[in-house]
Amino acid sequence: MAEKVIIIGSGPAGWTAAIYTARAALEPLVFEGAITEENRLAGTLPLGQLALTTEVENYPGFPAGNLENYLDDSIAKDRRMIMAPHEKRGVSGPELMELMKQQALNFGARVITQDIVRVDFGTRPFELTDSDGRPHQALAVIVATGARANYLGLPSEEKFKNRGVSAGAVCDGALPRFRNKPLAVIGGGDSAIEEADYLGKFASTVYIVHRRDQLRASRFMARRAMENPKIQILWNRTLVEVLGSDTDGVTGVRLKSTIGQPYLEKRVTGLFLSVGHTPNTAFLEGKLEMNEKK
Ligand SMILES: Cc1cc2nc3c(=O)[nH]c(=O)nc-3n(C[C@H](O)[C@H](O)[C@H](O)COP(=O)(O)OP(=O)(O)OC[C@H]3O[C@@H](n4cnc5c(N)ncnc54)[C@H](O)[C@@H]3O)c2cc1C
């Protein structure tokens, strides 16, 4: 029998859809994604992108810092219906995602740990195929497949993936090869600053390589970068080559100037890409209307 609604994806959007459809008695079935090496490398494991980060500071209701103090300041004790959790801090990305999932499960959402790899929206009910080859039918489908981190597409970057080149500081940043060593982050947005700030806990220096003379990041995050003594911003530079060897992996980066200065080389043992994201919609091409951003 066809499902009333199938939700594809298990980031914040997927669990939000699951909570609302479950409460509307639509008995949602969530495909949370498959746990495979390919998905790990692409950063598309279950629970989505927020599960790849540390503390989440901007989620309303989960202030960073000491939650008990925050409650003391904001709600008088006799008006409080909730107790402060035992841990006196804000929420981490993985915790927040586990909580969202649990909330959806509590309302009866069901979960299959597979990707959806094929869809046919030309028939009624809709037909979907999961990564185990099993067919599923649904009267409605909610696509919440999020996005994956971009790479620049340089051959040298591909060569050193997993040997110093990464798009996930939180997953990889604490590895021994990055400890007390200089590292580079490519990008200039909030994510790049967040990555650099996090890497600063382990690295000796973190270079942020940015192609312009101004960060794209929010003012708050830009200030964080400027105030971190371990972060050094290399303005008006782009990456042209990741330097390294078969034995050592990444040993440096070669940077081009965007304003006509000579090339610059920096010795680093790690390179972290933070250059935007691409929607996980390849399996929907030709099946749904898309714009140039997919
Ligand atoms: C390092 C980092 C730090 C961040 N920090 C913050 C922060 O502090 N605050 C903030 O507000 N935002 C932050 N973000 C952004 C935030 O994580 C995203 O905006 C949010 O996760 C998007 O949610 P989503 O549900 O749309 O998609 P995603 O989180 O991308 O989730 C998509 C899900 O779909 C699954 N999926 C994909 N394709 C398929 C398929 N074919 N079949 C089944 N499942 C599939 C994936 O496995 C994934 O679980 C951060 C992002 C990153 C990368």
Image (tube, rainbow, N blue to C red):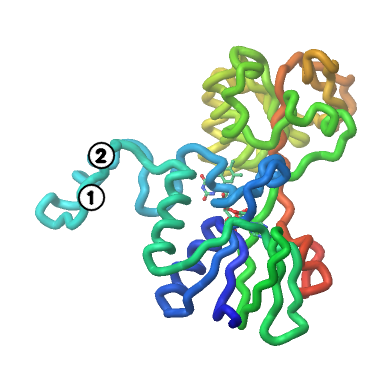
Query: Looking at the rendering, which quadrant does residue 102 occupy?
Result: bottom left
Q: Which mark is residue 91?
A: none
Residue closer to the observer: 174 or 38:
38
Where is 6 relative to 185, above or below? below
Q: Are marks 1 and 2 in contact (CB under 8 Å)?
A: no
> Residue 186, located in which quarter of the rendered image?
top right
Residue 86 - label: 2
Q: Secondary structure at mark 2?
A: loop
Task: Specify which label sits upstream in the sequence, 1 or 2.
Answer: 1
Give the camera-side residue of 187 and 110. Answer: 110
At horizontal 67% and vertical 45% (from top left) the residue drawn is 36
Instruction: Check disc 1 and report its element: helix, strand or loop.
Output: helix
Residue 39 x %, y %: 69, 46
Identify the amino acid type marked 1: Ser
119 lies left or right of 7: right
Q: Is residue 195 visible?
A: yes
Please state the total of marks drawn on the protein image: 2
Amino acid type at circle 2 is His
| Residue 173 placement (x, y as % from top left) | 60, 27
Quarter of the image with the C terminus is bottom right
The residue sitting at 83% across, 72% down in the picture is 286
The circle drawn on residue 74 is 1
Image-based side of 19 in relation to 196, left or right: left
- Can residue 213 be seen by looking at this rendering? no
